[in-house]
Image: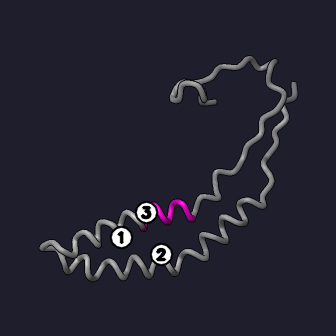
Amino acid sequence: MENPISPGQLLRIARQKITGIQVEAVGGRNLARLAKGSGSALHRLIGSIFTPNALTGLVGTPMVAAYFVAVTPFCAAGDLFARLKPPLDIEIVD
């Protein structure tokens, strides 16, 4: 288990002190990842419109924007369904 106080270091806990483990899904961040990836790509492509690579910016900007518009509903649905799943409970038995 990763130590929340000092990230990157392991946190050691005696087995007798653990009564259960709860695992929550990592999913549900599809829209955030889409916005981060598409946003940075759009920023670079729009910036390249006024450079010698203008053709790349002029062709790539509408393509990334169309991808963002087409994929957004699926990312939103994935985020919604990820929130509906209950967390996984694990019991420690001897």
Residue 90 on image: x %, y %: 81, 39
Question: Tag 2 or tag 3, which sits nearer the N-term?
Answer: 3
Write down the residue under mark 1.
42
The disc placed on residue 37 is 3
Element type at marker 1? helix
In this view, 65 is above or below 43: below
Q: Residue furthest right?
A: 93
User: Magenta span covers which residues?
Assistant: 31-38
Q: Which quadrant would residue 76 be assigned to in this image? A: bottom right
Residue at left offset 31%, top offset 78%: 60
Q: Most prominent secondary structure in the magenta stretch?
A: helix
Asked whether, in this view, residue 61 is left or right of residue 7, the answer is left
Residue 38 on image: x %, y %: 42, 68
In this view, 81 is above or below 49: above
Q: As shown in the figure, which amino acid type bears the numbered disc 3?
A: Gly
Q: As shown in the figure, which amino acid type bears the numbered disc 1?
A: Leu
Q: CA distance from mark 3 to mark 2?
A: 10 Å
Question: Tag 1 or tag 3, which sits nearer the N-term?
Answer: 3
Q: How is the image coloured?
A: one colour
Is 93 included in the stretch rendered in magenta?
Answer: no
- Whether residues under marks 2 and 1 lie with C-beta atoms below 8 angstroms apart, the answer is yes
Residue at left offset 29%, top offset 71%: 45
The disc placed on residue 68 is 2
Q: Residue furthest left?
A: 52
The quadrant of the image that shows the N terminus is: top right
Residue 19 on image: x %, y %: 84, 27
Asked whether, in this view, residue 20 is left or right of residue 53, the answer is right
Residue 25 on image: x %, y %: 69, 51
Residue at left offset 87%, top offset 24%: 94
Q: CA distance from mark 3 to mark 1?
A: 9 Å
